[in-house]
Amino acid sequence: MGSRISGFSAGRFVAGLVLLVAASMASAQNMTVFAAASLKNALDDVVKTYEEKAGPNLAVSRVVVSYAASSALAKQIESGAPADLFISADLDWMDYLEKKDLINVRTRQNLLKNRLVMIAPAASKTALKIGPKFALAAALGNDRLAMADPAAVPAGKYGKAALEYLGVWNDVSAKVAPSADVRAAMLLVSRGEAPFGIVYSTDALVDKGVRIVDDFPENSYPPIIYPVALLASSKSANAGAFLDFLKQSQSRAIFEKYGFR
């Protein structure tokens, strides 16, 4: 009898230990964030600060960020990609996921704002003043205009809207070199493969290979707003804490350092 009770107790102990280890492993699982490519430098710093603040003694999972165009990330989420939090570079792709019940709507909020600029290679001396009917087509000549894909990527959609508003889209649409995301478009300009590009002001500030030629009038394109939300499929117990950290003054100071508003 005693040995049977002892064995039963030992079994319960082992089972309890397994559950404890499993819970510990779950808390140590990575937290996955899907974020617009334009956020990379700023969000990398925010994540580093978050993890340093959490310290080794807190049950906080490591934050892993996947950067790409908001359109590509939204499609991946729709296809079942495992992620805990999504930061889009426009409202439309967050709306897309919300309509499909793929985000936790109670956690959705607008996080940041940005601006649109025209860039050129840093060594370029070309001047171009943006305004109605400005001479972009003539400045391009036989060269290409680098911008994110205007058919799907937020930066490209904003750029197309601005060029349409200013009355020059029809003149340059055939000259557009569409890229997978805004950082890829900037790289074409930084390498000198395109004489001009349209990117966010925050992108231009982190690449020494480009310079800002001029700002687009803010009334020429829809407000550039970055919404954030937890995903309905999130399995991370710490994703909510990271979302809260994104809104704190420490994070806000980092985003503002990189030009976000």
Image: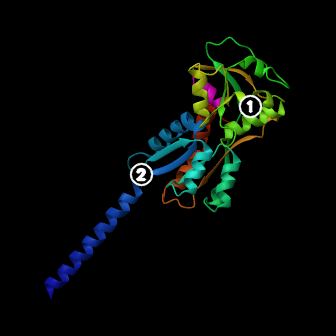
Could you say where residue 137 lies in the image, as x and y percent from the top left? 76, 22
- Vertical arrangement, residue 98 with respect to residue 72, above or below: below
Q: Is mark 1 on a helix, strand or loop?
A: helix
The quarter in which the N terminus is drawn is bottom left
Identify the magenta region.
201-207
Q: How far is mark 1 from mark 2, CA to CA?
A: 52 Å
Amino acid type assigned to the residue bearing label 2 in the image? Leu
Could you say where residue 174 lies in the image, as x and y percent from the top left? 72, 30
Between 201 and 4, the residue placed more toward the observer is 201
Q: Does the magenta stretch include residue 52?
A: no
Q: To which residue does mark 1 refer?
A: 173
Give the color scheme: rainbow, by chain, secondary structure or one colour.
Answer: rainbow
| Main secondary structure of the magenta stretch | helix
Quadrant in the rendering for residue 78: bottom right
- At 65% from the left and 41% from the top, the residue drawn is 153
Could you say where residue 26 lies in the image, as x and y percent from the top left? 40, 59
In the visual, does 17 lie left or right of 223? left
The quarter in which the C terminus is drawn is top right
Amino acid type assigned to the residue bearing label 1 in the image? Ser
- Can you tell which of label 1 and label 2 is closer to the viewer? 1
